[in-house]
Image (spheres, rainbow, N blue to C red):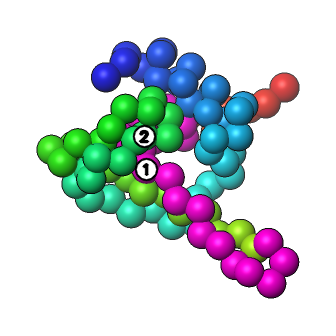
Amino acid sequence: MPDEPLLREHARAAIREGRIPLRYPDRVWGGPGAGEPCAVCELPILRDQLELEIQFARSDGATPRLDKFHLHIRCFSAWEMERTKPRT
């Protein structure tokens, strides 16, 4: 797994490119990885790793939707630091 500065760079890119929202999630779940790719580093989250699934509710007209993103713990932390840092 990349070091913290590189993870934060990946998190900034994911936010900038719209691959993961900037706002706080509506729900956060944790558990063992299921092989899904991480929304920040794009590496699979293995069974022996802890995965956080973050969920964002949204509505497109009459149809409510739930967007889900899977992250390693360290990638979640990098995303959270980038998401909450002051913008100029």
Q: Which residue position is annotated with label 2?
A: 38
Q: Earlier in the sequence, mark 2 or mark 1?
A: 2
- Gap between marks 2 and 1 measured at Cα: 5 Å
Is 56 inside the magenta-drawn segment? no
Q: Element at badge 1?
A: strand
Residue drawn at x 42%, y 20% as measured from the top left = 4
Stretch in magenta: 60-80
Question: In this view, which residue lies farthest toward the left?
Answer: 48
Residue drawn at x 44%, y 33% as measured from the top left = 42
Residue 17, position as x, y percentages in the image: 71, 33
Q: Element at badge 2?
A: loop
Say if 33 sits above or below 66 in the image: above
Report the side of 12 relative to 29 (left or right).
Answer: right
User: Which amino acid, by three-letter code, is at mark 1?
Assistant: His
Answer whether residue 84 is visible to the viewer in this image.
Answer: no
Say if 24 sits above or below 79 in the image: below
Residue 76, position as x, y percentages in the image: 45, 41
User: Which amino acid, by three-letter code, is at mark 2?
Assistant: Cys
Q: Which residue position is annotated with label 1?
A: 70
Q: Which mark is residue 39?
A: none
Report the side of 24 relative to 86 (left or right).
Answer: left
Q: Tell me whether the residue at label 2 lies in contact with that at label 1, contact meaning CB atoms closer than 8 angstroms.
A: yes
Residue 38, position as x, y percentages in the image: 42, 40
Q: In the depicted view, which residue is nearer to us: 30 or 66?
A: 66
Residue drawn at x 50%, y 41% as measured from the top left = 39
Q: Residues within 10 Å of mark 2 (few under 14, many from 20)?
A: many
Residue 59, position as x, y percentages in the image: 76, 74
Answer whether residue 49 is visible to the viewer in this image.
Answer: yes
